[in-house]
Image (cartoon, rainbow, N blue to C red):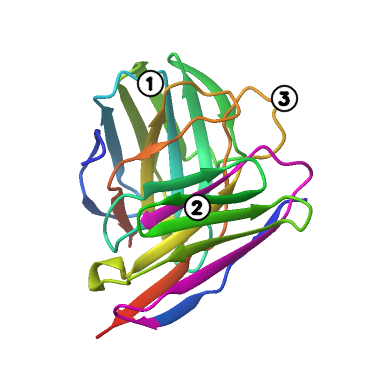
Amino acid sequence: GQNIDQPTEMTATEGAIVQINCTYQTSGFNGLFWYQQHAGEAPTFLSYNVLDGLEEKGRFSSFLSRSKGYSYLLLKELQMKDSASYLCAVIPPYGGATNKLIFGTGTLLAVQP
Amino acid sequence: ETGVTQTPRHLVMGMTNKKSLKCEQHLGHNAMYWYKQSAKKPLELMFVYSLEERVENNSVPSRFSPECPNSSHLFLHLHTLQPEDSALYLCASSQDSSGRYNEQFFGPGTRLTVL
């Protein structure tokens, strides 16, 4: 089966650091995406991890541990505009004809002054 | 702007109506997708098209009928919907439909309410 877990909501303070966790149980794995979605807008790509370790991109970093079925998104120097939903999505085993993403429910992050 | 547009942005329809959602991508991609996003639920893949051919139909009821006349346009035709079909319908595109790494670009979605 396929299962992806994320916290439903998180709150953090402007200027702080927040870590959003994602755990997955899937029958195989071919990569993990993080997307950001502001209310009423399209999800936008943040990061892609397929190998273990940390990928850094400006204020955002994403970490993956394949052996633990675990990823996190780290947001530094939080800004009010970072208030959004953060979606974790896993690519199941390649072998089908489609680039099928399995999404978690998303974590709604509220950044407070 | 992600290069994927959707119209209308909001739609209210009765259960006996027929309506269509439209998606257009300006990225030169070969694959297009329809997703359903309901409150408190994960994004659910509905359909995948690759080079105008449907390659995935994720057990979607027949009251949802997709159409892909060319690689830039994707439609979702709706008829005799149920109130539980009310959701945000998102379109996405990617360079190809298969491959280990293929970022999907999403449109802003159509907020559908079925009365």
Which image quadrant is residue B95 in?
top left
Asked if residue B37 is among those painted magenta in the image, a careful observer would answer: no
- The residue that label 1 is drawn on is B68
Rendered residue at 37%/45% (across/down): B90
Q: Amino acid at mark 3?
A: Gly
The residues tagged by marks 2 and 3 sit, at their Cα atoms, a distance apart of: 22 Å
Q: Is residue B115 above or below residue B28?
A: below
Query: In x, y percent, where is residue A3?
Result: 70, 57
Badge 1 vs badge 2, beta-carbon distance below 8 Å: no
- The residue that label 3 is drawn on is A95
Find the magenta span and give its range: A12-36
The residues tagged by marks 3 and 1 sit, at their Cα atoms, a distance apart of: 24 Å
Query: In x, y percent, where is residue A16?
Result: 37, 79
Q: Amino acid at mark 1?
A: Cys
Q: Amino acid at mark 2?
A: Leu
Q: Residues within 10 Å of mark 3 (few under 14, many from 20)?
A: few
1 vs 2, front mark: 2
Q: Secondary structure at mark 2?
A: loop
Query: Of residues B60 and B26, which is closer to you in this image?
Result: B26
Q: Chain of mark 3?
A: A
Query: Of residues A56 and B106, which is closer to you in this image?
Result: A56
Rendered residue at 42%/71% (across/down): A108
From the image, give the main secondary structure of the stretch colored magenta. strand
- Count of labels shown? 3
Quadrant that contains the C terminus of chain A: bottom left
Q: Is residue B11 above or below residue B76?
A: below
Nearest to N terminus: mark 1 or mark 2: 2
